[in-house]
Each structure stands twice: as C-alpha cells, then as structure tokens.
C-alpha cells in the first residue's frame, strides 16, 4: 500500500469511528487547525488578507503571503487530493465562501451582475485590455456589479475598470501607464505595479467588483483591484459559479481554451434555460470571433438548425455597442 493510501485508510478510519461512536475526531480538528487557511470562513477575502505581508519595496515577500502559503499547501497535499481530512477542509472552506458570496450578491439585482471573460495572457498594453477597462468602468458607474475569474489579463482589466469608476479618463490612462511597466503576469514587477496603482489611486468610492479566482491556478496571483474575492479550491465549482451568477450577461473578449470552455458552458445553461431565462452573450471583436476563432458563425449555425435554442448571442466591436447591448437586456423578454 502506498503512503497516500495508508494516510487515506487511517484518516477514513478515524472519521468512521467518530461517526459510529458519536464522538468528535480530535485528529481531524488538529489537522484543520494546522493548515494555512481557515476552514469555517464566514466572509469573502480582501486583497489585504491574501497579500498580508506583501511589501511593495520588497516584491520577494509575495512568497510569504497567505495566498502563496495556501497554494504551496495545495500543491504539497495534491490539487486533486483524496486525503479525507484535506478534502473535508477544502470543501468546508469553499462552502463558507459560496455562502458569503450569496450574501454579498443579495445586495444587487441579479440581472445587473455582468461577467467579463477573456484570456489571462492579455497584455496591459493591448487596446483590448483598455477596452475591457472602459466597459467595466462605465457599467460599474451605472450600478452594475462586474465579476470575473479574478486573475490577470482581461480579468484584471474588469476589476481595474471598477476600481477606477468615478475617475477621469486621464486618471485611467495614468493607471494603465503605471501597469504597463510589467505588461504580463509573468513579468518581474507585475504585482508591484498593481500595488503602485492602488497606492496612487486608493479606494475611495462605494463601487465594488467580485473576483472568483481559484488556487487550482495558484501560479497566477489574484487581481488586487477586486473589492471582494471569492477564492475557491475547486475550479469546476468556480467555473460554474461564474457562468451562473452573471445573470445580466457575459462579455467575451479574446481568449483561448479557458474562454472557449466558458462560452460552451454558458450556452448549455441558456439552451436549457437552467436559471429561469437566458442571458446575453456578447462576442467582442468581429474579426477574432469569426475568423481567428470562428465560434460565432458556428453558434449561429447551431441556432439556425435547432441544435441550440434560447441563445441571445451578439457580435460587437465598439464599447458603445457593448454597453448598449447589456443595458437593453430585459430578462424573460
């Protein structure tokens, strides 16, 4: 029997014994006290908690931050763990996060929750990045809640836009100029420049945004501009939550495999009207979605042949078109 199987057998034996004798399991309690995350969470994360010891002048301190400590623990214990104590701890943690997220979302009309999807590799210097920032900023200023997967690229642009809501275009230009020193998350200084923007433009408004990242992709630091962070262990739950909560529509900027997964996952929900009504799916950049990655004509073909039903798809290019399409959406009409 391998070491992992021995651990599994021992821990399951302790749990079953605790259940059968109606006693507690001190070994499991001790285990949950020893891990670097709180099992019984009752609130969402803040940037200040995940990056608790980060020093902008000493970026190497990221390696000691809570976010990194938890990611190292996840890698050590296995991303797809079967160890009962660890699995129980992660499940309880994610359940608490989801309950806290539901409480937060109850502050908003659900059809005013809008998601932005797109590639994590999108550069901060790209016009697409700037467009995503502008879209998010304008919708946030009109009291929409913007959500994303909480990572870099188009996801970061979502939360930067919400963070800069109420500020001028010149201030947005300045923020992006600061970030452009390290255009991609693999670049040295990527996280440092993010905190420099927060330092230059501190949070002063009531505008919020919700990020839903995962430690499954823990090599990508979560976006520091989201005011609420629902970080989860289970990526499958995280992906489903993103699609489910964006009742007001999903805006797809250019991306690769992950974005394609999200497109078809949302199409299934809308086809079966799983949530009461379909939500709009906006594909930004005609050339990209019809030629480079021809998803849009495929979905049109599927609709025309009845393979897909109830999809509200639209191909858009300009920021004004995106804003108009989102605001024109009337649930159930």
Image (spheres, grey):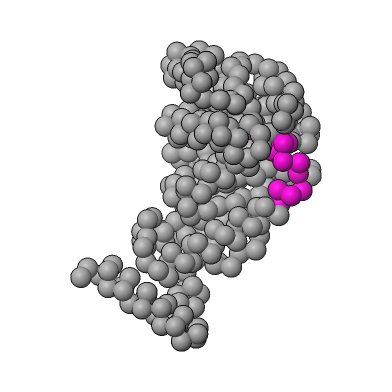
Percent x, y of residue 66: 52, 60
Residue farthest to the front?
A: 306
Residue at 60% across / 45% down in the picture?
211
**Corner quadrant of residue 273:** top right
Along the line of sight, which residue is nearer the eye, 333 or 14?
A: 333
Would residue 160 be visible to someone looking at this image?
A: no
Residue 271 against residue 235 in the figure, above or below:
above
Residue farthest to the left?
A: 1
Residue at 57% across / 56% down in the picture?
50
Percent x, y of residue 221: 50, 46
In the image, taking residue 320 as reference, residue 291 lies left or right, namely: left
Percent x, y of residue 323: 71, 23
From the image, which quarter does the N terminus lie in? Answer: bottom left
Residue at 65% across / 63% down in the picture?
42
Percent x, y of residue 280: 63, 27
Q: Is residue 215 magenta?
A: no
Write down the region rendered in magenta.
104-115
Residue 60 against residue 249 in the figure, above or below:
below
Residue 295 against residue 196 in the figure, above or below:
above
In the image, taking residue 68 as reference, residue 13 lies left or right, namely: left
Count of numbered labels shown in the rendering: 0
From the image, which quarter does the C terminus lie in? Answer: top right
């Amino acid at each position: 029997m391998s070491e992992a199987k021995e651990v599994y057998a021992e821990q399951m034996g302790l749990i079953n014994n605790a259940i059968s004798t109606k006693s507690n399991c001190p070994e499991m309690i001790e285990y949950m006290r020893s891990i670097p995350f709180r099992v019984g969470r009752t609130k969402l994360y803040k940037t200040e908690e995940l990056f608790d010891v980060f020093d902008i002048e000493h970026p190497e301190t990221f390696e000691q931050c809570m976010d990194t400590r938890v990611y190292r623990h996840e890698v050590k214990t296995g991303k797809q763990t079967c160890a009962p104590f660890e699995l129980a701890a992660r499940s309880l943690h994610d359940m608490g996060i989801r309950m806290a997220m539901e409480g937060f979302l109850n502050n908003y009309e659900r059809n005013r929750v809008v998601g932005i999807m797109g590639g994590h590799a999108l550069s901060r210097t790209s016009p697409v990045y700037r467009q995503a920032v502008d879209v998010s900023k304008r919708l946030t200023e009109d009291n929409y809640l913007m959500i994303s997967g909480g990572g870099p690229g188009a996801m970061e642009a979502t939360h930067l836009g919400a963070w800069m809501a109420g500020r001028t275009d010149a201030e947005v230009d300045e923020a992006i100029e600061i970030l452009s020193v390290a255009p991609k998350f693999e670049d040295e200084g990527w996280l440092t420049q993010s905190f420099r923007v927060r330092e230059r433009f501190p949070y002063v408004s009531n505008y919020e945004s919700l990020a839903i990242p995962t430690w499954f992709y823990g090599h990508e630091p979560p976006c520091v501009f989201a005011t609420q962070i629902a970080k989860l262990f289970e990526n499958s739950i995280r992906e489903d939550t993103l699609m489910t909560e964006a009742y007001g529509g999903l805006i797809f900027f250019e991306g690769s495999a992950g974005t394609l997964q999200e497109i078809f996952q949302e199409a299934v929900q809308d086809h079966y009207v799983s949530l009461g009504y379909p939500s709009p799916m906006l594909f930004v950049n005609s050339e990209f979605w019809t030629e480079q990655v021809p998803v849009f004509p495929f979905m049109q073909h599927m609709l025309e042949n009845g393979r897909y039903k109830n999809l509200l798809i639209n191909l858009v290019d300009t920021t004004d078109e995106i804003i108009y399409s989102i605001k024109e959406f009337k649930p159930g009409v």
